[in-house]
Amino acid sequence: MSGEEAWTGRNISVLSTSSSIKARCWQGEVLGEAFFGRCIELEIDPVRRYKWANLQQLETETKAKLRPFLMRLGLSIAENDVSAQIEEFTKGFAKKPWGQLMGEIAGITDMYLDKFREIAAAAPAGERDMAQAMVAHETALNNFAKRELAGDAANSLSEVIAQLHWPIAPPT
């Protein structure tokens, strides 16, 4: 999920207070929600569909948490059309082994987690809670993928589900 260009070669303490970075966080959740939704559509295994659905639910609930925060700051909550990006990201999905998909998620979330930690460290007092929530959100996604890679499928969703108000029920 692109966005690395937003971080390159800039002072993170300046970025942490900019509306541009907050907008990118919002659009990142829009993209993540759409990506995981597409994964649900393409997945044939019911247990993996359940996992994708909980990841999508985390993105959805994080958007709900971000919405009043961004509105309070006078920022847009318009959602960009990400359908072309999603089609590109999910090309060849059915042919990729689960481990490869999890490795890709771990790599992407590693990058964003580092950036969110820097933002949280530099966030003004009135924005610190939201910045920490974004760190917790990205940590849950990252740990999910890493637990899956480590073979801990039974516990991989634990941090994700702990953050959800409305988790998706496992398949019966």
Image (cartoon, rainbow, N blue to C red):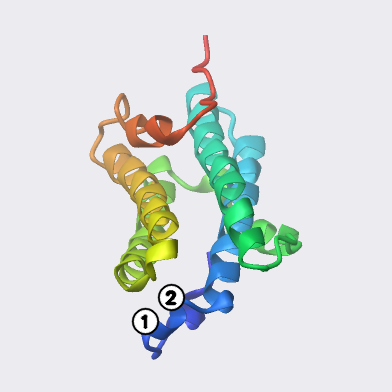
Number of marks in the image? 2
Q: Report the residue at 63% width, 61% height from top.
A: 72
* Residue 135 figure quarter: bottom left
The residue carrying mark 1 is 13
Q: Report the residue at 29% width, 42% height from top.
A: 149
Asked if residue 157 lies left or right of residue 47, the reply is left
Asked if residue 76 lies left or right of residue 51, the reply is right
| Residue 92 drawn above or below residue 61 | below
Q: Residues within 10 Å of mark 1 (few under 14, many from 20)?
A: some
**Residue 90 visible in rendering:** no
The residue carrying mark 2 is 16
Asked if residue 26 lies left or right of residue 170, the reply is right
Q: Are marks 2 and 1 in contact (CB under 8 Å)?
A: yes
Q: CA distance from mark 2 to mark 1?
A: 5 Å
| Residue 86 drawn above or below residue 43 | below
* Residue 60 figure quarter: top right
Q: Report the residue at 30% width, 45% height from top.
A: 143
Instruction: Give the camera-side residue of 25 and 42.
Output: 25
Which structural element holds mark 1? helix
